[in-house]
């Protein structure tokens, strides 16, 4: 693969929020996981471990846990002005059922063993308490790119503390393991629209930070309002 082919993969990868129920070949999942294990990590600690969930009953229980979390999220989003809410919460108190991952044939949980932080020098451990999370973010990116390369859709689902507490007993996850991401994987059930990205010139600085690009608080609020409108097309609500 040359750089242009890689850029095409990066640009066309999408976070999918609905999936077909068609099974994903085991060899595809194996290749995705093989790509994931080659991600970079501080001190080569490799904190990641993966839980592949395909059992329908387990996936149903996880979906119910996500819906339970959704009630808490709805309550919090209701405190924001309508324009600032995530697109699917604009219609509060009527929230459409989360179509998300319910039909995805594979749920991939990305976990991390917090004890691997000891592989780094002490200054890293004390100055950067989230080193395990940062390491795991690298492998998560690899998973999404590998899924796209396989012709599959994937969704990045952050595991909040609330959701983590619900899925731990379902999956039998030991206390030392952090649950950081859930990645539904499957064949896309709809045609994805192009996602909005800021222009490169807006985020690149040469030699030192260009203060003319620093956004004021008002500019940041305006950006988020604009972002809400530009992002709506990629959130299928029905």
Image (spheres, helix red, strand yellow):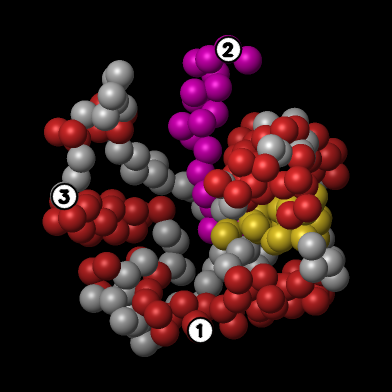
Where does the N terminus fall, quadrant-wise? top right
The residue lying at 69 percent from left, 76 percent from top is: 165
Does the magenta run of residues contain 11? Answer: yes
| Element type where label 2 sits in the image | loop
Circle 3 residue? 216
Sequence-wise, the earlier of marks 1 and 3 is 1
Q: Residue 217: which quarter of the image?
A: bottom left
Label 3 or label 2, whichever lies nearer to me, is: 3
Q: Nearer the viewer, residue 13 or 47?
A: 47
Circle 3 residues within 10 Å: few <14, some 14–19, many ≥20: few
* 114 and 150: which is toward the camera: 114
> In the shown orientation, is residue 226 left or right of residue 19?
left
**Quadrant of the rendered structure where residue 150 is?**
top right
Give the number of the disc on residue 2: 2
Q: Residue at x 71, y 39 (%)?
A: 120
Nearest the viewer among 127 and 95 is 127
Looking at the image, which residue is at 58% across and 12% down? 2
Q: In the rendered view, does 195 fall on the left or right side of 228?
A: right
Q: First in sequence, mark 3 or 2: give its number.
A: 2
Distance from disc 1 to disc 3, alpha carbons, whole Å, reads 33 Å
Q: Which residues are magenta?
A: 1-21
Query: What is the x, y in percent for residue 215?
Result: 19, 45
Can residue 147 be seen here? no
The residue at the point 18 percent across, 34 percent down is 211
Could you tell whether 226 is left or right of 29 in the image? Answer: left
Query: Furthest residue to the bottom?
Result: 93
Viewed as shown, does residue 104 lie left or right of 157? right
Q: Is residue 134 above or below residue 101?
A: above
**Given the current orientation, which residue lies at the most extreme top position?**
2
Q: Nearer the viewer, mark 1 or mark 3?
A: 3
Residue 34 point in image, percent of width and height: 80, 34
Read off the residue under disc 1. Answer: 71
């Amino acid at each position: 693969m040359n750089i242009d082919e890689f850029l095409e993969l990066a640009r066309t990868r999408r976070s999918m929020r609905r999936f077909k129920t068609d099974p994903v070949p085991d060899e595809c999942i194996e290749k995705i996981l093989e790509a994931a294990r080659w991600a970079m990590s501080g001190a080569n600690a490799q904190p990641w471990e993966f839980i592949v969930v395909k059992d329908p009953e387990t996936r149903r229980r996880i979906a119910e846990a996500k819906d339970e979390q959704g009630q808490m999220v709805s309550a919090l989003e209701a405190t924001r002005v309508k324009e600032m809410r995530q697109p699917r919460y604009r219609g509060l108190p009527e929230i459409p059922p989360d179509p998300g991952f319910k039909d995805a044939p594979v749920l991939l949980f990305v976990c991390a063993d917090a004890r691997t932080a000891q592989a780094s020098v002490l200054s890293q451990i004390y100055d950067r308490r989230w080193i395990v999370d940062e390491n795991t973010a690298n492998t998560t990116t690899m998973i999404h790119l590998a899924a796209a390369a396989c012709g599959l859709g994937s969704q990045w689902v952050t595991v909040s503390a609330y959701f983590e507490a619900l899925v731990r007993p379902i999956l039998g996850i030991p206390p030392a393991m952090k649950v950081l991401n859930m990645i539904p994987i499957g064949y896309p059930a709809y045609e994805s629209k192009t996602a909005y990205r800021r222009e490169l010139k807006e985020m690149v600085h040469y030699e030192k930070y260009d203060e003319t690009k620093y956004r004021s608080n008002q500019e940041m609020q305006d950006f988020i309002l604009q972002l809400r409108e530009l992002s709506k097309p990629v959130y299928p609500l029905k």
